[in-house]
Image (cartoon, coloured by chain):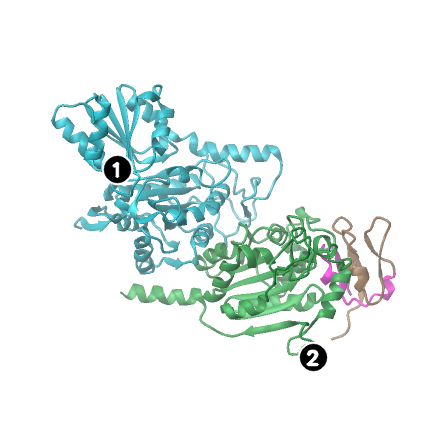
Amino acid sequence: MAKKKLKQHHIDRDWCKGCGICVHFCPKNVLELDDMDKVFAARPEDCIACKLCEIRCPDLAIEIETE
Amino acid sequence: MSTQVKFVQGNEACVEAALYAGLDFFAGYPITPSTEIAELLSRRLPMAGGKFIQMEDELASICAIIGASLTGHKVMTATSGPGFSLMQEALGYAIMAEIPCVIVDVQRGGPSTGIPTHGSQGDIMQARWGTHGDHAIIALTASNHQDVFAMTIEAFNMAETYRTPVILLFDEIVGHMREKLVLPEPGEMPLVERLRTSVQGGVNYHPYLPREDGRLPMSDFGGVHRYNVTGLYHDMWGFPSADPGVAHGLIRHLVDKIENRTNQLARYKEYFLEDAEIVMVSYGSAARSALHVVKNRRNRGERLGLLELQTLWPFPRDIVREKCAQAEAVLVVELNMGQVMQEVKKALDHPEKVFLANRIDGVFITPTDIRKILRLIQGKGV
Amino acid sequence: MALKDYLRQRFFPHMWCPGCGHGTVLNSLLRAVEQLGLSKNEIVMASGIGCSSRISGYVDFHTLHTLHGRALAFATGVKLSQPELNVIVPMGDGDALAIGGNHFIHACRRNIDITAIVMNNRIYGMTGGQFSPMSGVGINATTAPFQNIDRDFDVVKMATAAGATFVARSTTYHAQQAADLIKQAILHEGFSVVEILSQCPTHFGRKNKQGAAADMMERYKDITVPVGSKKKAENPDLIERGIFVQEEAPEYCREYDKIIAKAMKG
């Protein structure tokens, strides 16, 4: 099975509580918290679509769309 | 088809009636003096395709029947004093979540372990106020096996009609005594079946939105309507709400749906009340002795009458008031310290004319016990 | 079906604190249900009282939010009366093992086909951080101001001893494994228990100097090992993850069907 490539990070800013779990565990350091303590993809080009952020997010606020 | 006559215990009469009413799920835990109900149903229910489960305690028993009611079944549990105490929390849940179920309490002496094998009527107020918070409750009782049968049917019918738990407050004496029971033919007694919603799947179904007639159609768990059931204050979808308006409306609804129908829910029997100077008010096994005294005195020309209550909650205050209006004295006969007497006093304009004939020692009240009190009321000395 | 289609989205964001592991358990649970392709109408979720128990409000199944500790008793009534339903019971550690301990061991013993998920955060969170039966000795809690002297117990061992026929453990750090274990637990015919270590940064982490949510999850990585790992023999304090029990035994509802058949024959 070929590795899936990132198409887009879908982040629900209303649902995100800024706990930082996704930022902490991202193996490629793609994610950051903004001034409002909401997550955003600062370096999407580095994303390997491992979905570790998506499956661990306690707020169900991140979805990784792959090609 | 010939009429079926049986010679049974009161507990067995309750079982026969529950099966007649369509009971198909029972959960319970052994406790004297109600155990025969569980024993009989462990055999009879699977014979009829229904289910019986013996749970780990009474807490679990009442919870299990509430769960089974939600999947669309007619359910019951049976217990006695200590077990009834354990059930109070979930009884409140069934009231709050409006889940039809029947809870039998075959009363024994209390408080605590008390006297398991002897009779009492000490749980009248526990049935009313045992669970916390403002609420209304329906509780029925009976003095003989034919009435145990009838009231058990009524309990199932009221539970379904009003989406509420109904308590059957029998006592050890009626529960264990053997007497004749005539079983009605199928179809002879009217039964109320679960009212299910006619709302189609995909359309918004509101489990807690009453129809114009006040009834709340249900939808079985596992069906097309997915909703929430909770013991928290909740909105018409069943979801928790802290809105004061929602909370107020909910509590009013839970109380009004029963209290506003007090007369409609009243079941009672009356004997020689037309011209009675002394009216006895009694219920359950105690009413048997009261009736005996009334009949004997009538034979001697004394104007005694009996109002036998079968609905204890909501307390039929209008009926008690009306039936006792002309009486010079009202004698409440019961096996406790006056739990119903206090209600009778509240219902009457002249509470000072209400007297109590009771026993609290686990011994059945006899006609002689009642006659002693009558002599006092009639000024004939001890 | 997309994961969000299993949610009652109008109630989001949910009421759990930032970084609460219970949200990750919900996440894992939905993945399991999605991978199994279950229909929302065939799932009943019963829960008790506490932070964990609020999970039932968020999922678009038939949901029964019950009394503290009693979810399994309600669920037993649901399952036995309607055995074709999938019944899932998420519980907190205090909910499942203190006030609901008796119901827990008897549900294990009966082997009724219910999936119990113990969301173990070692604290009573809803009431503000009192010690639970899973806190253990030396823990700080609002009711253990001089440190806890109450010993904890091992859910896996207790469920096993009580007769559960599927027993597993994972953590919110190992969310993928947690989802897989829940999936297997739902598929298992019999009573299944999945314990998931779930961080409470607000009431447990802060009082016990375990850092933020992510630090607590890092700790799960450090203190757990797969079942049967050699490291466990070297360091008995490590907590094993994975499947501990997976066996076939007569399931309660099926056995009761046999009772009905026997009774009807007369």
Amino acid at circle 1: Ala
Q: Could you tell me which secondary element the residue under label 1 belongs to? A: helix
Q: Chain of mark 1?
A: B
> Which residue is at 65% across, 72% downward?
C240
Crowd around label 1: few <14 · some 14–19 · many ≥20 (10 Å): many
In the displayed structure, would residue B206 be above or below residue C102?
Answer: above
Q: Quadrant of residue C181?
A: bottom right
Amino acid at circle 2: Glu
Q: Colour of chain A?
A: brown
Q: Is residue C92 visible?
A: no
> Which residue matches tag 1?
B286
Residue B55 % position (x, y): 42, 58
Residue C202 % position (x, y): 72, 52
Crowd around label 2: few <14 · some 14–19 · many ≥20 (10 Å): few
Q: Colour of chain C?
A: green
Which one of the lettered chains is coloured cyan? B
> Which residue is at 18% across, 48% downward?
B3
